[in-house]
Amino acid sequence: MGHDEDDAARAIAVHPSGDEFVCATAKGCRLFKLVTEEFSVRLISKDVPSLQSVGPQKCLSFSTDGAKFAIGGENGHLRVFHWPDINLLLDEPKAHKSFRDMDISLDSEFLVSTSTDGSARIWKIDEGVPLTNLSRSMDEKIECCCFSKDGKKPFLFCTVVKGHNVVTVVLDISNWKRIGYKRLLEKPISTLSISLDGKYLALGSCDGDFCIVDVNKMEVLHLSERVHLGSPVSSIEFCPTERVVISTSHKWGAELTKLDVPGDWKVWQMWLVLLCLFVTSGILFYVFFKHVKKPSMIKSPRTRTFFHGMAMAALHALIAGAATISHLRQIHAHLLTSGHLPSHGAALLRRLIAFPNLHLPHAHRLLLSLPPQSLSLSLFNILLPPLASSSEPTSAVLLFLRLRRGGLRPDAHTLPHVLKAIARLARPHPGSLLPLVGSVHAEVVKDGLDSAVVYVPNALMAAYSACGCLDRAVQVFDEMPRRTVVSWNTALTACADNGRHDRCVEVFLGMLEAGSVPDSTTFVVMLSAAAELGNLSLGKWAHGQVVARRLDMTLQLGTAAVNMYSKCGAVSYALRLFERMPMRNVWTWTAMIVGFAQNGLAREALELFDRMELSMVKPNYVTFLGLLCACSHAGLVDEGRRFFHEMQHVYGIMPMMTHYSVMVDVLGRNGLLQEAYDFVVGMPVEADPVVWRTLLGACQLHSSKDCIEIVDKVHDRLQELEPRRSGNYVMVANIYCEIGLWDEAANVRRVMREGGMKKIAGESCVEVGGQVHRFISGDDSCPEFHEACMILIELNLNMRKYEPADPILFTDAN
């Protein structure tokens, strides 16, 4: 196949169906159909323009379900397509310097890719960003990689070169750590592949050899030498039959090799023959019975019952023997047209659910089409978990209501997933689904599930918390007869999500008194609570507990610690921890960037963002929020405009209202009031009160008679949006006073008095000696009030001796 230099296959990927495969050539990719005849195998080429024009590719990979196809180019360009319509899902031009190898995980969630420089990167396909880099020593190079495919062992296989030695390493994908290694080929390994059932590895060498390895025993079962006459094997793929391997090299193209059949495969073939005989006999009986035109032809009732029973058995055998979703759809269509769906729909649904890659919408539609008498609670319990975790949790709630209308009573396996779906729906609109949670709670109490199992009350707490009803969540927690660490973590999260960070400390102390051992999730919540409270002592103590208990510094835990130190003002601690983290994701980088921005270190924030881009981490909407805040505090208007433009036109992130508000602050702080006003008026969405208030604050900062027209327009708009907010009137009155428009200021205060609006006293907190002190404007009841005033006066006198180099700092000081 293709011995011309431009058409020679450089890499190959076989579709899981076995009907087609893609070859990479010097110009692009070509699609082939594999047609098996009695004594030969024939290839048919198909034209796919979007693949033929991608240029030279070094590695190709199909997902296990065949729905995704990834290619990595010699120039480091990563593309992921939806198959078979070839729609582009992911396009990352700078994924690597140059690709070496890649593979997609069984659940299509992760993609592993290796580079020619020896590095390896794990990608989250749906997010389109690298999750982590695989750890390696300075003298190691990770070259080939593939995921396990059996669905039971979540492993990643990699070949690692160290000096002249090449070993196959096994990694656990739950933490991406190595758990074992073995040297399988004496020669340098050029490629690695795995069979569809996950039982066998294929390793190709740089001398044109390849071997087949038993994954469980890590022993070589088959060895073919010099298949490509000394040319390195560039790719190797199993056909679905597991008895034929397609290998490629740059010099000799593609070769088909029939493998030696191991003993366990012979046993598998015997079972396959028996199954085929049984299914064939059943089909014959079913076809005979279905095409009998006159029932009188079968005179004996016993004979008729026998044939009917055989026909039904054949139908069950067809369902049980269906190998693909396509086959099940054909059976489904036949059941609909023949009227047998009520009696066989449940069996069809069970077979559909048993597939490793469940087609959720099809299964959901099938369940809804079944008559109530053929449904059982087990079918609902199988479908509810994936529906509750899907992008449409409403389907899980509607399915639960269908279950109740059908007279079925939910059990302990049903309700947690229903409550999870309700919680996901309730978060954007707290309180809207509270009655539904209350009705589920009543059902839980009625059936005694609140005391029988612990995970139902945990789900209830999470649902009440999502509805903004913390008191009821705490009530459920208090009434639990038994609590696990998950129960305590759920209670902590409920307090944090509802803004009661001070209460998190009380719950955590109660957890320790009860003898429950906190885990990583516990300390993530505690570090977040310390960050929101600004309590550095609490945050340091929580971090110290993590170290003392020897908990793994996971991404979540490390990011929470970086965020805590940043928000508490200890930026040096945050940076030190950030630099020591072995793995960082977009949230880790963002936490550090926001930390720099919040502490006035704008240049450091921008430099860290440059490092983030060089590390091939794609920023998110929070990253740009931190960058815009940094530009606002430092008066970097041009950089602010650039980041706002890049966010939309380079990274495809649509601005949220907070981004517009901060951009107005960037312009307004620098006195560009007219530009800021034009920016607000030209927004593609209606500006909310926060945006207008930000612009009004900028007018107060640069109050002059030139801005009075803008002040009046902003004040009129705020009166429409927030007619009862006293702070807006106070700001406008202060602006009039600073300009010298005393009559207008008096008029504004008169409107406030007549409307019964009062100025809300300002409030601030400060932590001293581990204790938080609260100060309210105009309140002199604090025991050390006079001492605090003397220190403020002294600070004010000392500050007057210095003139800041940046006028923005001067306005902030005022």
Image (cartoon, rainbow, N blue to C red):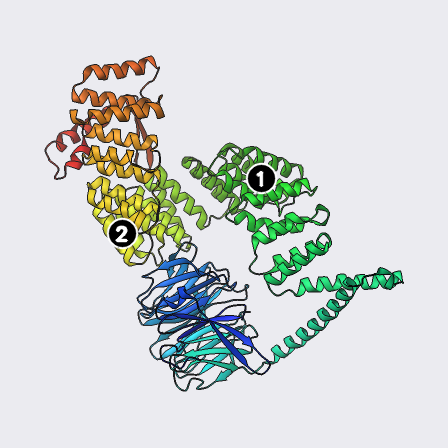
Pick out the residue farthest to the front: 293
Residue type indicated by callout 1: Met
The residue shown at (59%, 42%) is 398
* Residues at marks 2 and 1, CA–CA distance in whole angstroms: 47 Å
Residue 481: x percent and y percent?
Answer: 59, 40
User: Which mark, by number, is residue 609?
Assistant: 2
The kind of residue tagged 2 is: Phe
Q: Is residue 258 visible?
A: yes
Neighbour tally class for label 2: few under 14, some 14-19, many 20 plus, Cα within 10 Å: many
Quarter of the image where the N terminus is located: bottom left
- Image quarter hosting the C terminus: top left
Position of residue 688 measured from the top left corner of the image (x, y, whole percent): 35, 32
Q: Nearer the viewer, residue 520 or 32?
A: 32
Element at label 1? loop
* Left/right of residue 566 with respect to residue 337 in the rendered view: left
- Residue 580: percent from left, percent from top: 31, 56
Position of residue 234 measured from the top left corner of the image (x, y, whole percent): 40, 77
**Which is nearer the eye, 307 or 563?**
307
Q: Which residue lies at the image location 11% right of the left edge and 35% below the top edge?
A: 802
In this rendering, the answer to whether 224 lies above or below 522 is: below
Secondary structure, mark 2, is helix
Residue placed under numbered mark 1 in the picture? 480
Number of on-image labels: 2
* Number of residues whose C-alpha sits closer than 10 Å to that of mark 1, classed few (under 14), some (14–19) or many (20 or more): some
Does 433 sit above or below residue 333?
above
Tag nearer the camera, 2 or 1: 2
Q: Please tell me which residue lies in front, 746 or 465.
A: 746
Res 102 → quadrant: bottom left
For image coordinates 31% across by 13% down, the residue present is: 753
Circle on res. 34: none
